[in-house]
Image (cartoon, grey):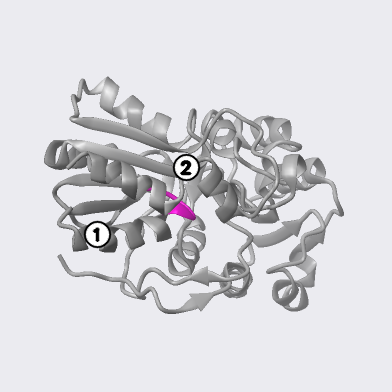
Amino acid sequence: MKQSYTMDEFNSARTVIGDTISKIGDKDNRIWLLTPDVGFGCKGFQEKHPDRFIDTGIAEQNVVGISSGLAYDGNIPFIIGMMPFMSMRALEQVRTDVCYPNLPVRIIANYSGLTGNGGSTHYAMEDMALYTSLVNMTVCAVSDPVQLAQIIEKSVNYEGPLSIRLDPGKENRILYGADANFEIGKGFMARDGKDITIIACGEMVDYALQLHKAAKEVGISVRVIDMFTVKPLDEEIVLKAAQETKRIVVWEDHLMKNGLASAVADVLCDNDIHLKSFKRFGVPQVYPGFGSAEELYHLYQYDMESVFAYIKTLF
C-alpha cells in the first residue's frame, strides 16, 4: 500500500479554515462567512468580502437563523464558532432552521471533546451524539489540516447541512501528504494491518498512527482507519476491517456512547458480525473535571499508553 502521510510538520487549522474559505469565496459569490464573535479564520475573508461577512456577536442561535435565511436565498453560508455552544446553545435552531429544510449551511467549530480545558462550559463531549441524531446533518471530525481543507472545498457542492469538529486549531500535526484524497462519507485507511483495526476520528487519529508504529515494533500489525466522516458512516470499510482483522478498537475524544463507537457497533450488529474483540475508548459517562486534554485522556484511560496496553493483552 502506498503511504501518503507526514508527521514531522505542523500547521494551524485556524489558518487553514480562513485561507480555504477565502479562496473559495474569491471564486464563488454564494459563499458567506458568519461568526458568533469568534475571530479566527475570519479576518482575511472579512477584508476581501465585507459584504458577505457577518459577526452576530455572542449569539449562536442568531448566527444559525441568519445562515438559514441566506441559504434559502441560494447562498452557501459557513459558520465559524465554538463547538460547545454551536452544539448545545444553538441545537434547536440547527435542527429546525437548517436540518429540517436540508439547507447547505456549514458549521465549523473548534474545542471539540475535552480540548477546551475550560470545564463544564467549554467541553464538547456530546456534540457528535447530538448532531448525528439530526436528520440530513453530515458530521465530520477532522484529524489533519490537509483533510480539513479538502472537506471545506468539497462541501461547496455537497448537499445539505454539514458540521466539522476540530480541536482548538492552534497547532496541528500534518498527518497526510498533499496527494491524500478524502471524500466526504468515506473512511480513509491511514495504515494497513492484519491483526487488529483501530477506527478513530479527530484528535485520536494522531495517537493511533503513533500506536501503529509502536505496535509494529512488538510484532502486532495494526490497521488504522481515519473515520473523519462519522455520519454518514462508511459501512463498507467497517465491514471489510471486521472481516479481515476480526478485532476492532474505536477511539474518540467524545462520550463512548452515541458517538463514533456506537455508530460502528450499529453497523456490526445490523450485519450480524461476530468479532474476536470489540473495545471502545473515549469519555466515560462522567463529568471529567479540569485538566489538560492529555491529562484527562490519561485519567480516563484513553491515552495511547492505555489503548496500547489493551491491544497487547489480545496477543
Answer whether labels 2 and 1 touch (C-beta < 8 Å): no
Instruction: Estimate how packed mark 2 is, as few (under 14), some (14 to 19) or many (20 or more) residues with alpha carbons within 10 Å.
Output: some
Which residue is found at the position 44% from the left and 69% from the top?
146
Name the amino acid, label 2.
Gln
Which residue is found at the position 49% from the left and 29% from the top?
258
- Above or below 213: residue 66: above
Figure quadrant of the C terminus = top left
Left or right? Give the position of 142 relative to 51.
left
Gap in Å between the C-alphas at discs 2 and 1? 23 Å
Stretch in magenta = 200-204
Q: Give residue 49's position: percent from left, percent from top.
A: 73, 73
Q: Name the N-terminal-most of marks 2 and 1.
A: 1
The residue closer to the viewer here, 147 or 97, is 147
Please tell me whether the stretch drawn in magenta is mainly helix, strand or loop: loop
**Residue labelled with disc 2:** 301
Name the amino acid, label 1.
Arg
Left or right? Give the position of 238 relative to 155.
left
Residue 151 is marked as none
Q: Give residue 55's position: percent from left, percent from top.
A: 82, 59
The residue closer to the viewer here, 200 or 280, is 280
Residue 84 appears in the figure = yes
Figure quadrant of the N terminus = bottom left
**Residue labelled with disc 1:** 191
Is residue 188 within the magenta segment?
no
- Above or below 201: residue 254: above
Which residue is found at the position 28% from the left and 21% from the top?
270
Q: Give residue 282's position: percent from left, percent from top.
A: 48, 39
The residue closer to the viewer here, 111 or 296, is 296
Figure quadrant of residue 127: top right
Instruction: Classify mark 1: helix, strand or loop.
Output: strand
